[in-house]
Amino acid sequence: MAIWEVPKVNGVEYRLPVYTIKDTLSTLPQEVIELIANFLSDEPVQLATCCLTCSAWYHAARPHLRQWKTIRSEEALRTLVRVLLTKRNERYGRALRSLEIWDNARKPFAHVFSLRVPGRLLVHLTALRLHGIDWSTVRPHPRFFKDLSGFASVIRLTLVKCRFRRPEELRAIANGLPNLKFFSLSLITVASAPPAADVIRKSPSISNLVLDKIQLFGSASAPQAYSVGSDDVQRLHQSVLDALASYSTVTSLQLDADQFLSFPQCQRFIRAFPRLQAIHMMRDPTWGPSSLPVDAGLLDSQTKPCAWDIMQLRMSSVSAKFTAQFLEAFASVFCRVVTLSIALKDEPTTSLLSVVRMLLRESGSTLHQVEWRCKVGMTGLPPNSPDPFAIPGPLTYNVNLTQLHVSFNVYPPASMSSFSLSLLAFFSQIESQCLQGIDIRVYVKRLPLPLMNTDTQSATAKFVTDFHAALSRGVFAGLPAGSVRVGFVLSTETDILPVGTVLSLVATIESSLVPCFTPWLCRGVVAIQLPDGTTIEDNPRDEVARSPPTTVHTIEDTDSDHAS
């Protein structure tokens, strides 16, 4: 490095250490430097100066300078207040973006934090997280909610494992933050609640008119949630939902299905938001046969009629049965869907494919993005079962599609023949000339698979000709270079696979699938990732077509949800 060059780490400039005697080490060991930095944890300005000293001091001081702060005790709260009120630390208050308060069950302090922490000094604080507060035993200070309004920059509030005396306290926290837009709740309980009839007669006054998104996680029926009888659980948790349903400005919901004690309760809650534009349902519920009465509180669909139009609909880690039930229940109000994302944890059923087909047809030109993920081959191929590699369709009416993402977790007895046939049907039904990206992934979860059978219908000359004809249609003329990816990934339970098994699978895919994509390979539109990590991105007859492998035996966990 030249003497005029200034080194940087994470965008922060620092000086290299300079010693008085050449080729000698610093007189201070690194652990001593780190100990000194620990004692300066409440002096952020001094820590910032340490970061500019040299590399050794930078790495010792940098962990203490974050844009977020976690408070776990009353002493830590006092330290934060002292730092913020010190004149030389004014820049630190402006640098904080996130504040987490973890209440102490033995010595609670969260009920007074808004009085002690000067919110006016945290002008750029956008996220506030409260964890483990219990106001059923310790009541909040009378000025708590009034002083909470001082945190005017906070737009995101997260409550985790919190217990309130009444649902009104939950609503008071949200209303205390004047610019709150994002409200996330996980495992929230209340100790008491009024009867549903009283809630109907006395509609709550809502002061927060900017709340846009609600997240609701956790299980309402978990043993740690409520320790009272089942009837009280239903009534108490209903009051929590009533408190949230009163925010009619909400346009986006992300819901854990297990937060609802029955499907009718889930229906009524969702229908309470007339401006809803996006919904994301997560995980399968554990509902029993019981259901709530039709006139239960604010969640009655007749109280707030729906006027939904364009929707972003996402389903993650759900079963085909629940997905079909959910879509059928809301088929009449999902007028148009702009984004459809379904990630199943099992194989699709005929009823699910039928309702998805109807939804695609009704969405028409409004639909822009489709994401589909499921398992293949888990239950074999019973009579009258759908195509194991079933891809939602037809997409004939969706002429404005821009993105298509499809992935399969494959188990025996799925075969390459059925996969190739599904691809042909998939590409033949696309009529959108606006496509910018197609991503198709096959995650091989268990071997051996019939994928290694080479004498299949997909390898016949007629099939290849039909495939070429489908890919050469005019609707695909505008596909950008590299916009299509077809990948095969070994994601089995075995870390190391025999080389012969991998090579056999690679040879099968090359011989049966690669010839089908020749039109797109010649144009540089498609890239085919093989199980050994190599990638074919050009004319397969070209020796330079194959990229070097990224790995020999790829092990990837695909059971978790991909980002939505």
Image (cartoon, grey):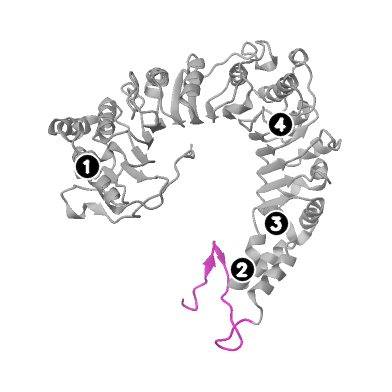
Query: Which portion, as a residue range, is magenta?
Result: 1-26
Mark 1 residue type: Val
523, 448: nearer the viewer:
448
Q: CA distance from mark 4 to mark 2?
A: 45 Å
Residue 564 in view here: yes
Residue 411: x and y in percent read 37, 36
Q: Earlier in the sequence, mark 3 or mark 2?
A: 2
- Residue at disc 3, secondary structure: helix
User: Which mark is nearer the camera, 4 or 1?
Assistant: 4
Q: Earlier in the sequence, mark 4 or mark 3?
A: 3
Residue 423 image-quadrant placement = top left
Q: Residue at x 61, y 68 (%)?
A: 58
**215 displayed left or right of 362:** right
Q: Which residue is mark 3?
A: 92
Q: Which residue is mark 4?
A: 225
Mark 3 residue type: Tyr
Q: Which residue is mark 2?
A: 58
User: Which mark is nearer the camera, 3 or 2?
Assistant: 2
- Residue at disc 1, secondary structure: helix
Q: CA distance from mark 4 to mark 3?
A: 38 Å
Report if the CB atoms under discs 2 and 1 are less than 8 Å apart.
no
Binning the other alpha carbons within 10 Å of mark 2 as few (below 14), some (14 to 19) or many (20 upward) gives many
**540 displayed left or right of 78:** left
Report if the CB atoms under discs 1 and 3 are less than 8 Å apart.
no
Mark 2 residue type: Tyr
Residue 64: x and y in percent read 67, 61
Mark 4 residue type: Ala
User: Which mark is nearer the camera, 4 or 3?
Assistant: 4
- Residue at disc 4, secondary structure: loop
